[in-house]
Amino acid sequence: MFNIALNTFREIVRNKFLYLILFFSFIFILFSVSLGKLSLWEDSKIIIDFGLAMIEFFGLIWVLFVWSQLLFNEVNWKTIFLILSKPIKRYEFILWKFFWFSLVILLLVIFESLVFSSVLLFKSVALTKLIWFSLIFILLKLEVLLALVLFFSTFMSNILTILVTVFIYFISHWFTIILDLATRTRNEFIINSVKWVDLLFPPFEAMNLKDMIGWIVWVTNTYLLSNLAYALWYLTIILFFTVILFNRKTFER
């Protein structure tokens, strides 16, 4: 099983799209320096916001357009029959795939974070704890998206998996607006329904610490730990149901 997982890692690392993402993320993060100079407001705020947004954006692109094709390619190329014919369990196949792709995401975020930190040091911008935790939460958001893509790919087509994941990503960032609109209706049923639906979505809005930079100095440890725990719980639940669905999935030769 380890050899199969290692081959998966090598396959991902050899993907040319990965290096294309690395190149463009590098260019765009460096571009934030010029963007800060063009700003009429505080340039450090623009550099931080743009740099963090680019790290999350290119991570999102990588998850959607590479990870979403991983399982589909193995089915289409019939390699999954060879893998599942070996003495391995299906849950091991899923979890090892997720682990190695998570490792690539981690390396991608570390590379982008190093470039981003270098830009901040060059511009004499302080690397605050809020910035570091913003990077950690960006990584965690990408891991949750990774699990969601894997979950939907067990029973949806490639395109539909991408569309649904993108929908969840944006809706999860807008629940405050949605709840505010529901509150204006003054209908308790609608308000409570929105609150219950909110529980089905990952806490991306609460994890979006980059929007708080420049407005507050720090958030409470309770806020950080509660959102971290909820994101990890959500990730675990998604992987659990992914394993169940994949165990029941049949593949046609």
Image (cartoon, helix red, strand yellow):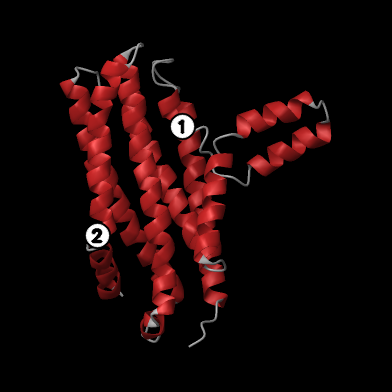
Q: Nearer the viewer, residue 149 or 29?
A: 29
Residue type, numbered disc 2:
Lys
Residue that appears at 77% across and 24% down: 184
Asked whether disc 1 touches disc 2, contact meaning CB atoms under 8 Å apart, the reply is no
Residue 9 vertical position relative to residue 57 in the rendered view, above or below? below
Q: Secondary structure at mark 1?
A: loop
Residue type, numbered disc 1:
Asn
Which residue is under mark 1? 208
Q: Nearer the viewer, residue 212 or 223?
A: 212
Quarter-of-image position of residue 245: bottom right
Residue that appears at 67% across and 32% down: 178
Q: Nearer the viewer, residue 66 or 216?
A: 66
Asked if residue 241 lies left or right of residue 90, the reply is: right
Crowding at label 2, few (<14), some or many (≥20) Cα neighbours within 10 Å?
Answer: few
Task: Give the image location of residue 248, x and y in percent.
Answer: 57, 76
Q: Is residue 128 visible?
A: no
Please name which of the two marks, 1 or 2, marks the residue nearer to the observer: 2
Quadrant that contains the N terminus: bottom left
Task: Give the image location of residue 102, x and y in percent.
Answer: 34, 55
Q: Nearer the viewer, residue 8 or 37?
A: 37
Which residue is under mark 2? 16
Q: CA distance from mark 1 to mark 2?
A: 30 Å
Query: How many tags in the picture?
Result: 2
Asked if residue 66 lies left or right of residue 222, the reply is: left
Task: Give the image location of residue 51, x and y in percent.
Answer: 31, 31
Q: Which mark is residue 160?
A: none
Quarter-of-image position of residue 36: top left
Residue that appears at 82% across and 36% down: 189
